Image (cartoon, rainbow, N blue to C red):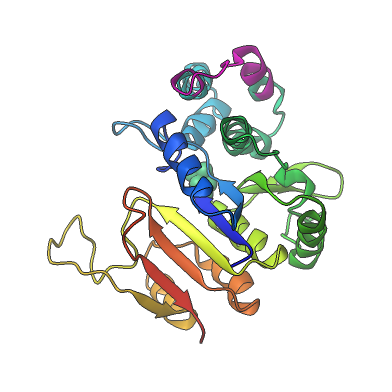
């Protein structure tokens, strides 16, 4: 395989241990060339960074400090300079709700790029929205094709892009799945790996049914039907870009990369 795009969900990059594990996964296969990251997820039942930023936008100043502290802890845990002043400045400068919410992914990608030593490519430069705030898939794929020609490896923040005036626009919640799928389609990837805290597609919710079994393979139409019925495995809007490009999606279990996961392909 030449190109694998890996998307790491918030539960994967919630702490320094997760950052190390994600780095190990990428370094284990040279085809894993593009990493799309969510904002750090919950630790010990606490809030996700995106939820803290939402609270901060609604006037909770302590939440902004808590969000900044999450990045401080991860950086220190990795033995990196936490660059606290830069983090706070990045958060303070965000002038709109979308801009502030997007900083969770941006700061996470910036830190992860330092952790693995790959370049950071800002999603604002490759995920395109029109002036009405609608995602423009053709423009985005064109930018990503150019990226693939010039930049063999990169860390890209999920969940947002920019409109023609440079204003940040976010995707729906859990939208980093969509960014990952767009990056896979645009870079001409052979495979889209979606890493999360579940073993893959299951016959039932393992938290409720201990007898839940892994489903090793599914088709894109089957996934679409599951999403319509409310299954929360993948964001439903992330299916089309990879399905249309003929790229399989591999749902992978972050804690157990040796497990088979679920391969979604074909029609
Ligand atoms: N961080 C955003 C959220 O919590 C987007 C994502 O994780 O995909 O919804």
Relative to 230, is 115 above or below? above
> In terms of secondary structure, what is the magenta stretch mainly?
helix
With respect to residue 181, does 74 lie above or below?
above
Would you place residue 265 above or below residue 209 in this image? below
Residue located 53% across and 34% down the image = 54
Position of 9 compared to 101: left or right?
Answer: left
Towards the viewer: 67 or 63: 67
Left or right for 71, reference 106: left
**Image spot of residue 175 (x, y percent):** 56, 54
Q: Quadrant of residue 102?
A: top right
* Furthest-bottom residue in this view: 267
Residue 12 lies left or right of residue 105; in this view the side is: left
**Residue 76 image position (x, y, % from top left):** 48, 17
> Residue at the spot x=76%, y=62% of the render?
136
Span highlighted in magenta in the image? 75-90
- The residue lying toward the viewer, choosing from 190 and 197, is 190
Asked whether residue 142 is drawn in magenta, I would say no
Name the one closer to the observer, 183 or 128: 183
User: Is 46 placed left or right of 24 in the picture?
Assistant: left
Query: Where does the image place residue 37, in percent across and percent down from the top left?
Result: 55, 45
The picture quadrant where one finds residue 30 is bottom right
Quadrant containing the N terminus is: bottom right
- Furthest-left residue in this view: 210
Is any atom of residue 175 visible in this view? no
Counting every numbered tag in the picture gives 0
* Residue, far top: 85
């Amino acid at each position: 395989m030449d190109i694998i795009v890996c998307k790491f969900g918030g539960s994967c990059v919630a702490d320094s241990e997760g950052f190390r594990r994600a780095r190990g996964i990428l370094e284990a296969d040279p085809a894993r060339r593009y990493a799309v990251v969510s904002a750090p997820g919950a630790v010990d039942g606490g809030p996700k960074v995106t939820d803290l930023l939402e609270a901060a936008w609604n006037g909770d100043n302590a939440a902004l400090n808590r969000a900044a502290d999450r990045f401080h802890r991860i950086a220190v845990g990795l033995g990196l300079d936490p660059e606290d002043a830069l983090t706070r400045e990045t958060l303070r400068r965000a002038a709109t709700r979308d801009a502030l919410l997007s900083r969770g992914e941006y700061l996470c990608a910036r830190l992860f790029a330092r952790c693995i030593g790959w370049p950071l490519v800002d999603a604002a430069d490759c995920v395109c929205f029109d002036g009405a705030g609608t995602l423009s898939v053709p423009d985005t794929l064109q930018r990503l094709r150019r990226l693939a020609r010039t930049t063999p490896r990169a860390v890209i923040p999920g969940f947002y892009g920019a409109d023609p005036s440079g204003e940040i626009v976010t995707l729906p919640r859990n939208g980093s799945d969509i960014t990952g799928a767009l990056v896979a389609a645009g870079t001409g990837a052979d495979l889209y790996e979606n890493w999360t805290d579940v073993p893959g597609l299951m016959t039932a919710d393992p938290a409720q049914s201990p007898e839940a079994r892994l489903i090793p393979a599914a088709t894109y139409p089957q996934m679409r039907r599951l999403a319509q019925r409310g299954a929360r495995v993948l964001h439903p809007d992330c299916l089309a870009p990879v399905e249309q490009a003929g790229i399989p999606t591999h749902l992978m279990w972050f804690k157990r990369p040796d497990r088979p996961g679920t391969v979604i392909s074909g029609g």
